Image (cartoon, grey):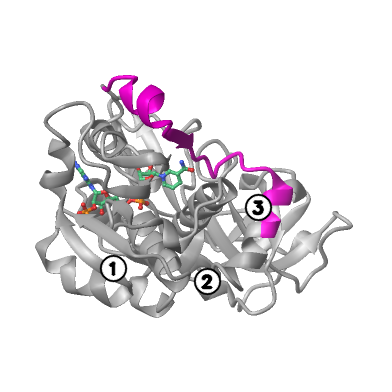
Amino acid sequence: MGELVQALGVPARFRGFVAERTDDRVETGIRELSQEDLADEAVTVRVAWSSVNYKDGLACSPHGRVARISPLVPGIDLAGEVVASTSPRFRAGDLVVAHGYEIGTSHHGGFAEYARLPDEWVVPLPQGLSTREAIAIGTAGFTAALSVHQLESRGLEPVDGPILVTGASGGVGSTAVAILAARGYEVVASTGKEAAREWLRELGAARVLGREEIAAGPERPLGREEWAAAVDCVGGSTLAGVLGLLRYGGAVAACGLTGGRELSTTVLPFILRGVALLGTDSVQCPLDLRTELWGRIAGDLRPRKLERIVASEIELEDLEPSLAAILRGEIRGRTLVRCS
Ligand code: NDP
C-alpha cells in the first residue's frame, strides 16, 4: 500500500469517490479520505470490488432521493478483506461481502479503498466464491436469487411453465435469467435492447421478447394465461401487464422501478386467478436469510456463465460515465469497480 497502515487497519489517507450535494446539483469526483471520514463501527474492510447499480446512479443524481447524507461515498455493495474488527464474528484476513441496509445511502459505501461497517451488515464470503465473483453477483444478483427463492418458496418448479424476466439485460434481470436457466426453467426474457438478444439467449433465455410488447399488456385486465411466474425489474405498466398474463396461481417477484413507480391495475388477476404479487427487498433482507442465500449463490443458485454477465471492469476514476449510463438504461449486465 506504500503507506503506514495505522491502528484499525486504515492508512492515514486513502481514496474514495464522493458525491456532494450543492444547491440543486450533485458534485462527484475522487477525494482523499482519512480514518475520521469512516463511521465508528466494528468491521473495517479493504474494499477489493464494488459495482455500479441503478441505485448508485440515483444516489449521484439531484432528483434521485437515495442519498441521505452529503458528502456521501456511494456504492451499495462491496466485497473485500477484513483488515480490523472489534466483532467476534470477524477477524483480519476474513473475506466478506456486504450490501443494502444504509450502505451507500446514509453510510459511506463501496466506492472507496476502505469501508467500515456494523458487523450485522457483513456476510462472510461463502466457500467457492472469490470477492470478484461475489461482486459480479452483487446487490443485483442477490436480488435475483432472492426473487427465485421467493417464487420457489411458493412451490414453483420448472415443470410449471415459462418464467418471464423483465428488464432482462440489466443487472438483476440478466442474473435472474442465468440463475433460472441453470435451475432448468424455461426462461423468457423481455428487453428493450435489440443488441442484447443474442447475449440473453447465451445466458439461457429460451425466447426473447421486445420490451414494448410486455409494457403494452393484455387488451383486457386479464389476458391469456402465459407465465407460470415472473421476475419484474421494471414496475409501472410492465408490472401491470405481467399481472394480467400470469397463469392461475402464478406469482411475480417485483423488485424494480426503472419503468416507473406507479402501478395501475385491477384486482381481477388476484381474485379470479389467485395470482400473487411478491414484494422483493434485498436492502433489509434479514441477516439469516441473507447468509443462507449467499451460501446458495455459491452452490445451487449460482448463475450460469457468470463471467458473461460482467460487462466491464472499471476504476474509481471511471465511475461518472457509468453512473450516468445506468440511469439512461444503457448498461448491459454488471459493471465491476476495482477499488483497491
Ligand atoms: P439496470 O439499469 O442494470 O437494469 C434495469 C433494466 O430495466 C434496464 O437494463 C432495462 O432493461 C430496463 N429499463 C430501463 N429503463 C427502462 C424504461 N424506461 N422502461 C422499461 N424498462 C427499462 O438496474 P438494476 O438491474 O441494478 O436494477 C433494476 C431495478 O431493480 C431498479 O429499479 C433497481 O432500483 C431495482 N433494485 C431493487 C432492489 C430491491 O432490493 N428491491 C435491489 C436491486 C435493484 P432492458 O433494456 O433489457 O429492457
Q: Position of residue 272 (x, y in %)?
A: 36, 25
Disc 1 Cβ-to-ligand 1 distance below 8 Å: no
Residue that badge 1 annotates: 205
The quarter of the picture where residue 168 lies is: bottom left
Residue that badge 3 annotates: 290
Quadrant into which the N terminus falls: bottom right
The residue sitting at 29% across, 42% down in the picture is: 234
The one nearer the camera, 98 or 300, is: 300
**Badge 1 local density, few (<14 within 10 Å), some, or many (20+)?**
many
- Can the viewer see residue 53 in this picture? yes
Residue that badge 2 annotates: 302
Tag 1: amino acid: Ala
The one nearer the camera, 14 or 63, is: 63
Tag 2: amino acid: Arg
Residue 121 against residue 126 in the figure, above or below: above
Q: Position of residue 252 (x, y in %)?
A: 40, 41
Write down the region rendered in magenta.
Answer: 265-292
Residue 127 against residue 211 in the figure, above or below: below
Upstream in the sequence, badge 1 or badge 2?
A: 1
Residue 293 against residue 272 in the figure, above or below: below
The one nearer the camera, 76 or 294, is: 294
Local secondary structure at mark 2: loop
**Badge 3 local density, few (<14 within 10 Å), some, or many (20+)?**
many
**Badge 2 local density, few (<14 within 10 Å), some, or many (20+)?**
many
